[in-house]
Image (spheres, rainbow, N blue to C red):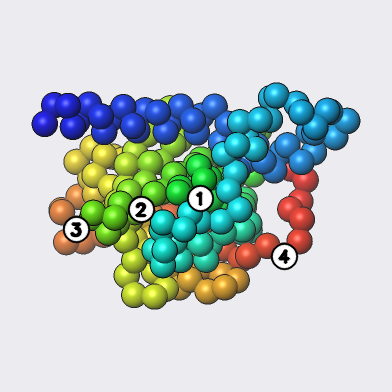
Amino acid sequence: MLNSSFMRWFFLWFLAVVLLLCISLGIRVAAATATAGRPASDSRLEMVTALEATGPHPSLGDHASVFDRLVGSWDVEYTDFAKDGKVTHRSGELMFGWVLDGRVMQDFWIVYPNGAHKDREVYTDLLYFDPKAGTWPAVSIDPQEASVATFTGSTVGEDRIVLDSHDLVPQETRRWSFNDIRPDSLVFRDEASSDGGKTWTLKSEYHMKRRATAPPVR
């Protein structure tokens, strides 16, 4: 049991290091501009190139379709609900893409600078399929807060993906969900429960539209 626990956390630590070193999808976007005037063999970008995958690994079979339909870039309207009733609106973007030979799906969240926040906020998640459990375990990285959380994802019907976590916030169950998934739109919700899932409080709701053109310069 101890060895199993150690290996689990070692694996999560390894994934976190990979993510914090490059946040590959975000760097991929920046690299398109940064590489102008640089040699094609720039060693600083070799890791980014090696992580990229053009599609899911064949071993995933039909399971890949759960997240493959989200691949691409999305414009996001963020809405957060505070305990005191304050509602905050922000804008940003979200990108999905396959990495690690197509065995892992990575997303990259960006919140544009706003108000007192002079810098953008960035977050990323790694999701991989567990064939034994039939679920999608996920590792979420918040570099601003230097935090790592684990989730377990599964589909609910044909247009909803739910990811549950018990270690994002102490003594609280957290539920992230992608809802009303359509080819060009979806809604993400972050909900919290302090009674074991009997009741849920909406913390955030993000409305997304698939991007058809280049993103604005931020």
Secondary structure at numbered mark 4? loop
Residue 47 position (above or below residue 165):
above
Q: Which residue is mark 1?
A: 102
In this orientation, which residue lies closer to the viewer: 143 or 201? Answer: 143
Of callouts 2 and 3, the N-terminal one: 2
Of callouts 3 and 1, the N-terminal one: 1
Distance between mark 2 and mark 1 Cα atoms: 11 Å
User: For the residue marked with disc 1, what is the amino acid?
Assistant: Gly
Distance between mark 1 and mark 4 Cα atoms: 24 Å
Q: Residue at x 70, y 24 (%)?
A: 43
Between marks 2 and 3 in the image, the one whose residue lies nearer the viewer: 2
User: For the residue marked with disc 3, what is the amino acid?
Assistant: Gly
In the image, residue 78 lies at what x, y percent? 54, 55
Q: Which residue is mark 4?
A: 212
Between marks 3 and 4 in the image, the one whose residue lies nearer the viewer: 4
Distance between mark 3 and mark 1 Cα atoms: 33 Å
Q: Which residue is mark 3?
A: 197
Q: Residue at x 27, y 59 (%)?
A: 134
Q: Quadrant of the C terminus?
A: top right
Q: Which residue is mark 2?
A: 129
The residue at the far left in this view is 1
Label 2–label 1 contact, CB within 8 A: no
Picture disc at residue 183: none
In this orientation, which residue lies closer to the viewer: 76 or 19? Answer: 19
Distance between mark 2 and mark 3 Cα atoms: 24 Å
User: For the residue marked with disc 4, what is the amino acid?
Assistant: Ala
From the viewer's perspective, tell me whether residue 87 is left or right of residue 2: right
